[in-house]
């Protein structure tokens, strides 16, 4: 990749130059680079540009304006690069990758109690736990994903309790969560099957108890919402747990149900039907056994990572499941997933490559970690494809993204060059 800053505002250069006289040379160079990224508009030129909104473009150009939004996308013969744009070149350009389910930012790379905030086990049902309150934007794993082309992650509380808490959608940039967040409350997470049993050492102890507890809380939430809409003097005291579940009942927020056994998946469908709520299936190792029911229910699936351990409820997982779901017409995305030990995250590009080796076409596989993932987590109006008006999030490669020897040589998020490797 070649990088070129065509111009820089004179005032910014003057300011940086003055500061250089009192700062170290190394710090001065870092400031100049920061100024260039902050002020320059960005043009990305790729030998092949996969927009995920149409056919790949040979010798394509993506222009990103000062507002961080994509201005134009098209072949170099019709999209002129204006003076003043920072120019990046790569063999292959794709939208920034979207990880459809992660715990990064709550789970840290040290794998020590102080940086493992993804699961709280004092109670089985805690939908009021906000991911935004535990997310660490400076976590090293966030940076690690960013330099590997992952620009958007759906992250939050992990499977391991019946209702462990909330999830959110963030960009992999910014020093504070407020700079990173796109959707502060994306889903309320739930776990059916062995993963959600006895997480507290008390209850629930079996599957029927877990489902009874979940149904009971949803019934309480329905009554709570009804009373809150009544006369002011008869409204109950504010209850964060029931308030959050009320958002699920109103369909404002989907229930993200981690379930791997076919019987647990069908239980999730029953709950969705009973309470008329939106659900997203997560994990879903045995989903290929019940594709007809899932298609009829119009439920999307965030499939388990292929690198997950094939044990317990996931012992019957298959690497061909993404292809099976595609053929059945069921929306599917891939994820880095949740690992109780290490690694604390995986790179979804690898998951997509394995899916391409097991039945998906290149475009279908890339979609599972770009536009299809964005649709399932509800952010496709902003990310997932390279189209005018969408966020300027791009991943740049020096070869086929699914080849092991290929490198990510540049990453742009919201029009800011956050990672750049000269060749």
Image: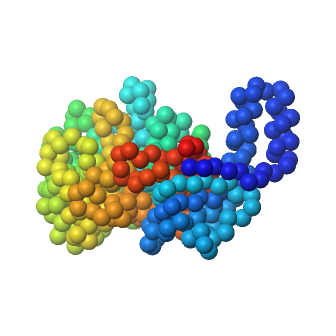
Residue 108 vs residue 27: left or right? left
Q: Is residue 171 visible?
A: no
At 85% across and 47% down in the image, what residue appears?
Answer: 11
Q: Residue 95's spot in the image, x, y percent?
A: 49, 59
What quarter of the picture does the C terminus occupy? top right
Q: Quadrant of residue 392 in the image?
A: bottom right
At 40% across and 54% down in the image, what residue appears?
Answer: 400
Q: Residue 266's spot in the image, x, y percent?
A: 17, 60
Tally of marks: 0
Q: Is residue 375 visible?
A: yes
At 63% across and 63% down in the image, what residue appears?
Answer: 63
Q: Residue 133's spot in the image, x, y percent?
A: 50, 41
Residue closest to the eye, 315 or 213: 315
Q: Residue 248's spot in the image, x, y percent?
A: 38, 60
Colour scheme shown: rainbow
Residue closest to the eye, 242 or 335: 335
């Amino acid at each position: 990749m070649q990088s070129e800053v065509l111009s820089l505002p004179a005032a910014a250069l003057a300011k940086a130059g003055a500061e250089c006289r009192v700062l170290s040379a190394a710090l001065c160079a870092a400031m100049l680079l920061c100024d260039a990224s902050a002020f320059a508009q960005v043009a990305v030129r790729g030998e092949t540009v996969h927009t995920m909104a149409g056919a790949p473009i040979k010798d394509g150009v993506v222009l990103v304006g000062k507002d961080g939004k994509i201005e134009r996308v098209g072949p170099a013969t019709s999209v002129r690069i204006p003076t003043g744009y920072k120019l990046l070149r790569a063999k292959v350009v794709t939208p920034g990758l979207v990880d459809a389910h992660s715990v990064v930012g709550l789970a840290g790379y040290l794998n020590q109690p102080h940086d493992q905030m993804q699961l709280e086990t004092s109670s089985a049902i805690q939908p009021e736990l906000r991911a935004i309150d535990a997310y660490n934007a400076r976590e090293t794993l966030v940076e690690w994903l960013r330099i590997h082309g992952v620009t958007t992650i759906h992250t939050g509380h992990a499977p391991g309790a019946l209702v462990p808490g909330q999830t959110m959608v963030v960009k992999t940039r910014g020093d504070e969560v407020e700079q990173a967040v796109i959707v502060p409350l994306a889903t309320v997470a739930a776990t059916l099957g062995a993963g959600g049993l006895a997480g507290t050492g008390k209850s629930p102890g079996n599957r029927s108890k877990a489902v009874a507890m979940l149904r009971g809380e949803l019934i309480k939430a329905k009554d709570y919402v009804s009373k809150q809409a009544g006369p002011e003097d008869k409204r109950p005291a504010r209850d964060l747990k029931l308030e959050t579940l009320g958002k699920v009942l109103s369909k404002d927020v989907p229930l993200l149900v981690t379930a791997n056994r076919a019987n647990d998946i069908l239980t999730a469908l029953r709950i969705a039907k009973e309470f008329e709520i939106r659900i997203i299936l997560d994990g879903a190792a045995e989903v290929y056994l019940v594709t007809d029911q899932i298609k009829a229910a119009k439920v999307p699936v965030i499939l388990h990572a292929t690198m997950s351990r094939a044990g317990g409820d996931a012992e019957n997982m298959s690497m061909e499941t993404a292809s099976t779901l595609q053929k059945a017409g069921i929306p599917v995305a891939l994820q880095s997933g949740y690992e109780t030990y290490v690694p604390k995250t995986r790179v979804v590009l690898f998951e997509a490559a394995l899916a391409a080796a097991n039945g998906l076409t290149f475009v279908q596989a890339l979609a599972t970690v770009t536009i299809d993932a964005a649709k399932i987590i509800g952010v496709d109006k902003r990310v997932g494809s390279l189209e005018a008006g969408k966020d300027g999030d791009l991943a740049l490669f020096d070869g086929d993204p699914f080849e092991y020897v290929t490198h990510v040589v540049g990453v742009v998020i919201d029009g800011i060059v956050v990672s750049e490797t000269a060749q």
